[in-house]
Each structure stands twice: as structure tokens, then as C-alpha cells.
């Protein structure tokens, strides 16, 4: 049973005194010291005591003035500096001081790069500043003098100091390592192996960079008994191992690019080019297409200022090759570099145009849209199955001016001729599209390239033969490849210049690297500079080559240079 709670005021019995069971407490006792202070406060001071106190005060004052004077002598300069500083600081309002202080500390952090800014929003601003202030080493020392440190603070200070020392030591070590490795270590014959363990790749890259460094300043940086060839051989071998190329192709790449560009080119081949699409202006406008795709969750942007029909796709929630817009032919999925030969061809409405190597029809459909479905477009491919793809694409994109043929382009002019323009997008080694097809790195050799350039020469000569040199609007041939090799590009053009009545004209393409007029001791026609080369590392495009030729009649001979400039009408209009 519990005790009953008494709630009624009237029934409450007034309890007075300590109660029956309570022990009576005695007088409270206090520690001596407390009693003393208390007692001095209360104690009456006698007149003698007062005198003694006055004397003590005077003595104390005298001591202070002497101290001040000596301090004044020794620290006059420092004090004047302090005064200046004080004046400066006093120049700011209190508010400004608050703003300026944290800024100073922030700079300090940036330099150290070790401190993190407080993330907690609840931390009051002033505390934040205090925290920042305490990070300064100088002030830390001051604090140490002023207040005794807690154990944990002392420990953390020790830890910080230890960390600083470790960091310093490891930085020193790294420096020594690099200095040690600055001299290129030539491997023995056995050490040069095809298979390099992953862990060694970093070392390999370091040596690659070092060799390039030596080759760039060979006279001063080489080892005395080493020849340039030795360094080049080592570089080639290391690059082959690092990037998995065969010797043949790596040789070609080293010949093509300045030392400073080789790694950039190889690295760019390890990365896919952006996914791009071309608007089919026969069916839609780029803006409308972009809007339609955005509505479907496709992240698109205009490709670049040099094209009015290209869009770049960053990412998509739907398969780009299966949207209703794709199926109804509003766009073609096409690498940006594929736009360039067609832009150079500059097809005009009502012309007769031949696309000699057309499958699967990416460029054919672009040509057709620029012709606005007028004139006649012949799309040929020697491969029957691939030729079927041209039919599919021309249907999808709504081309109505196109005839698809399945002939060997090397003999095409025996079947048809009289074209105003012709595109020869020749079969090639694919050395410009390694990112798309990495197998190219290892499977090409001298014979493959020979096979390619033989076919390319035959195709180009036959394309020239199928052109009407008296065409009022045209008489042009555009030759393109997705190869970077001169054998398949400048050398093929040179062969055509030597064997047919054609001359090089400007492509009209506003960017790209000039074609070679000289390569490894071989001279090409000076106007080879009109050709355009595109590289993944420079243009973020597939490697590509574009040349434009104009056929002249043998009776006419070469036209004057001024006439090589394209007519105003010979410009492409994208939309
Ligand atoms: C680079 S692809 C053409 C790509 C095409 N222009 C496009 O943009 O879609 C080269 C094409 O040439 C074709 N080809 C190869 N040898 C040929 C020949 N002797 N005559 C005609 N076409 C040939 C191949 O079948 C291949 O489709």
C-alpha cells in the first residue's frame, strides 16, 4: 500500500522545525583560506596598516616605471611598428576586421592545402574564425605560452608535427627517385618483351617521356655512347608495349607526328569520339529534331559552328538507333568527320553526282539532302550486302533521286559517265579510326597498305574518268579516306595528278591540318597543302583525309590559278 497523497490545503498540517527524526546541525565550518579572505574584507585597517599599504603601493609604482623605461629603450623600433599596425587595423571598422581576418586565414589554407573548411552550418561564424586562428603555428605557440594545453591537444600537436615530417621525407624521396631515373635506363635485349605486366606500365610511361625528353634535346641530354636510332628504337618498343601496337604501325605513327604529339595521338585513340547525328534536312530542321529528342530524354547539343546539321549526343535514356525520329528518317547516326568530304564536294541541285564507294550510305544521304532530291545521285558499292544497306537508308531518309548500283568502282566508267561531281570515299587501312576498331593496331602490315593504295589509285582514276570535264556547275572529284597514312592519301592524289587531267583545288573546309607537300624525302605537289587532314587528338574527330580535284579537258590544259577558286554558287547550303 502506498502513502496517500494529501491534496486538500485545509487538511495539510503545517510542519515546523526540523522534525522529530532530524538531527540538529552544528555551526558550519569553512576552510581556513576562505575565512582569511573573508576576514580581511571585513577587518578594519589600522592607521599604521594604512601607512604600510601606501608605502607598498608607492614601491610597486616605482618598480613599474623603471620596468617601463627599460622596455621603452630596448623595443622602441618594434613598438613603433606595432603602433603602425594598430593604426592600420584601427583604420578598418570592426565589421571590416571581421571580414578581413577570415580572408587572411583562407589564403593560409589555400597555401597549405591541408586544412578543410568547416562544413557544419550550425557552427557560429565567430567560432569558425577562432578555429581558423588557432591553426596558425605562430599563434599556436602563443597559446601554448598563455594557457596550459590539454593532454589531447598536446598529443594532436605531436601527431601533426610527425605527419609534417613524414610528408617532407616522402617528398624528398620522390625527388631523389625522379632525379635517379632522369637518366634513361636502356633495357637488355631480353628485357624488351611484348608482354609487360600492368605494374610496369607506369615505369614504361616514365621511360617513354624521358626518351622523348632526350630526343627533344639530343645534343645535351643523350648518353654519350648512345645514338639517336637507339633512342628511337627504345621509344618505339616502349610505345608498342604500352599501347599494344605492332612495330609496323608504330613506325608509321612516329614518322607522321612530331615527338610532342605522338603520345597525344595514341592517347586519343584510346578514347571514343562523341556520338554525333546528322539532321536530315529533307524531313526536319535541326532545332525541331533536337527538341523532339530532348523530349524523349536525349541530351543533345549543336555539334560545332562548322556544321548546321550536326548534333552531339551526350547521353540518352532511349536507344538512339530506335527512336521514332530515327525510324522515320529525321537523322542519320554519323561520325562528325564524315560530314567533311560531302561539305567539300558541295553538291548542287539538279546535278548528276556519283558516290563511288557508298555503302552503307551515310554520305550518300547527306549528298541527296543537299541536292534537295533533285538531279540524279548514283550510289555504288562493290559489296552486294553492303549495297542493300544503301537502299534501306535512302528509303528511310526519303531520298527519291537515288539509283543504287553494285559495280566494281575500278571499272565504273565503263558503265556510266558524264557526272558533274564524284565522291570517292575509298576503302582504306582504317588507321584514323583506331578508337572505333582497335584491331587495326595489330593487324596491318606493309602488304595491306599496298593493297589499299593500289585499289585507291584505281578507284580515283576511274572516278576522274567518269566526270564530265565540261560540266558547267562542277567537274569536281573529292577523294577521302579514314586513314592517316601518306601512302593512302597524298601519294594517291599525286598519282592522279601524274596520270589524269586534274588539279588540286581548295576544299572549302575552314579547319584541318594542311596536306603534306614533303614527307620523308618525298616531294608532293605544292598545292597538296589544299588537302585537309583531321586527327583525333587535334580535332576530336576520327582521323580523316580530304582532297578536292577539278578535272580539266586536255585541250584546255591547266586553267589559271585564279580560276581554281570556287565559284560563289559552289558553296554548300545546309539548310
Ligand atoms: C569507307 S567505306 C564507304 C563508306 C560510305 N561512303 C559511307 O559514308 O557510308 C568504303 C566502301 O567501299 C566499298 N568498296 C570496296 N572496294 C570497292 C570497289 N572496288 N568498288 C566499289 N566499292 C568498293 C566497300 O564495300 C565499302 O563499303
Image (spheres, rainbow, N blue to C red):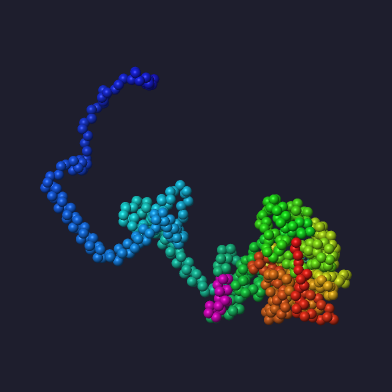
Secondary structure mostly taken by the magenta-highlighted segment of the chain: helix
The C terminus, quarter of image: bottom right
x and y, in percent, of residue 454 in the image = 78, 74
- Residue 161 on image: x %, y %: 39, 59
Reply above or below: 324 against 69.
Answer: above
Report x, y in % for residue 156: 39, 54
Residue 131 in view in this figure: no
Left of 374 or right of it: where is 318? left
- The residue sitting at the right extreme is 415
Q: Ligand 1 is in which quadrant of the figure?
A: bottom right
Check if residue 516 falls in the magenta segment.
no
In this view, 130 is above or below 234: above
Which residue is most to the left?
A: 48
Residue occupying the point 42% across, 61% down: 164
Give residue 247's quadrant in the image.
Answer: bottom right
Residue at figure coordinates x 78%, y 69% from the top left: 569
Residue situated in front as seen by the camera: 510 or 190: 510
Q: Which residues are drawn in magenta? A: 207-223
Which quadrant would the N terminus be assigned to in this image?
A: top left
Q: Is residue 216 magenta?
A: yes
Residue toward you, 21 or 306: 306
Residue name at image x 81 percent, y 81 percent: 557
Location of residue 72 in the rendering, given as x and y in whole percent from the top left corner: 25, 63
Amino acid at each position: 500500500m502506498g502513502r496517500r497523497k494529501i491534496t486538500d490545503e485545509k487538511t495539510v498540517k503545517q510542519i515546523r522545525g526540523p522534525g522529530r527524526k532530524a538531527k540538529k546541525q552544528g555551526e558550519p565550518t569553512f576552510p581556513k583560506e576562505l575565512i582569511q579572505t573573508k576576514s580581511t574584507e571585513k577587518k578594519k585597517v589600522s592607521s599604521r596598516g594604512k601607512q604600510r599599504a601606501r608605502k607598498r603601493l608607492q614601491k610597486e609604482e616605482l618598480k613599474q616605471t623603471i620596468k617601463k623605461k627599460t622596455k621603452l629603450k630596448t623595443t622602441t623600433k618594434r613598438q613603433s611598428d606595432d603602433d603602425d599596425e594598430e593604426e592600420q587595423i584601427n583604420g578598418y571598422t570592426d565589421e571590416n576586421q571581421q571580414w578581413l581576418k577570415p580572408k587572411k586565414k583562407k589564403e593560409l589554407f589555400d597555401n597549405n592545402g591541408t586544412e578543410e573548411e568547416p562544413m557544419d552550418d550550425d557552427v557560429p561564424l565567430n567560432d569558425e574564425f577562432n578555429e581558423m586562428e588557432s591553426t596558425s603555428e605562430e599563434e599556436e605557440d602563443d597559446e601554448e605560452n598563455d594557457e596550459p594545453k590539454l593532454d589531447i591537444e598536446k598529443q594532436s600537436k605531436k601527431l601533426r608535427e610527425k605527419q609534417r615530417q613524414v610528408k617532407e621525407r616522402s617528398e624528398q624521396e620522390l625527388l631523389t627517385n625522379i632525379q635517379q631515373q632522369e637518366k634513361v635506363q636502356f633495357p637488355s635485349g631480353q628485357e624488351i618483351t611484348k608482354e609487360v605486366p600492368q605494374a610496369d606500365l607506369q615505369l614504361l610511361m616514365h621511360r617513354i617521356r624521358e626518351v622523348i625528353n632526350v630526343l627533344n634535346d639530343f645534343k645535351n641530354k643523350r648518353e654519350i655512347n648512345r645514338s639517336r636510332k637507339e633512342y628511337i628504337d627504345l621509344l618505339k618498343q616502349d610505345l608498342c608495349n604500352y599501347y599494344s601496337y605492332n612495330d609496323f604501325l608504330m613506325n608509321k605513327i612516329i614518322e607522321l607526328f612530331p615527338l610532342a604529339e605522338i603520345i597525344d595521338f595514341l592517347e586519343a585513340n584510346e578514347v571514343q569520339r562523341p556520338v554525333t547525328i546528322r539532321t536530315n534536312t529533307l524531313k526536319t530542321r535541326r532545332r525541331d529534331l533536337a527538341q523532339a529528342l530532348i523530349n524523349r530524354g536525349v541530351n543533345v547539343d549543336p555539334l560545332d559552328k562548322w556544321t548546321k546539321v550536326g548534333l552531339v549526343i551526350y547521353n540518352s535514356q532511349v536507344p538512339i538507333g530506335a527512336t521514332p525520329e530515327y525510324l522515320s528518317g529525321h537523322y542519320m547516326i554519323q561520325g562528325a568527320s564524315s560530314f567533311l568530304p560531302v561539305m567539300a564536294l558541295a553538291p548542287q541541285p539538279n546535278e548528276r553526282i556519283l558516290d563511288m564507294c557508298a555503302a552503307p550510305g551515310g554520305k550518300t544521304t547527306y549528298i541527296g539532302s543537299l541536292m534537295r532530291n533533285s538531279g540524279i545521285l548514283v550510289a555504288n558499292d562493290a559489296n552486294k550486302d553492303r549495297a542493300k544497306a544503301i537502299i534501306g537508308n535512302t528509303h528511310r531518309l526519303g531520298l527519291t533521286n537515288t539509283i543504287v548500283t553494285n559495280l566494281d568502282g575500278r571499272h565504273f566508267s565503263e558503265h556510266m559517265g558524264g557526272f558533274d561531281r564524284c565522291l570517292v570515299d575509298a576503302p582504306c587501312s582504317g588507321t584514323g579510326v583506331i578508337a572505333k576498331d582497335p584491331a587495326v593496331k595489330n593487324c596491318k602490315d606493309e602488304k595491306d597498305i599496298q593493297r589499299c593504295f593500289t585499289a585507291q589509285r584505281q578507284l580515283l582514276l576511274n572516278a576522274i574518268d567518269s566526270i564530265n570535264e565540261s560540266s558547267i556547275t562542277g567537274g569536281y572529284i573529292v577523294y577521302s579516306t579514314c586513314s592517316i597514312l601518306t601512302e593512302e592519301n597524298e601519294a594517291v592524289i599525286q598519282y592522279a595528278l601524274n596520270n589524269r587531267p586534274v588539279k588540286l583545288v581548295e576544299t572549302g573546309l575552314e579547319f584541318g591540318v594542311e596536306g603534306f607537300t614533303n614527307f620523308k624525302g618525298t616531294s608532293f605537289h605544292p598545292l597538296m597543302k589544299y588537302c585537309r587532314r583531321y586527327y583525333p587528338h587535334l580535332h576530336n574527330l576520327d582521323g580523316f583525309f580530304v582532297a578536292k580535284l577539278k578535272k580539266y579537258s586536255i585541250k584546255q590544259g591547266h586553267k589559271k590559278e585564279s580560276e581554281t577558286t570556287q565559284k560563289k554558287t559552289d558553296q554548300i547550303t545546309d539548310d
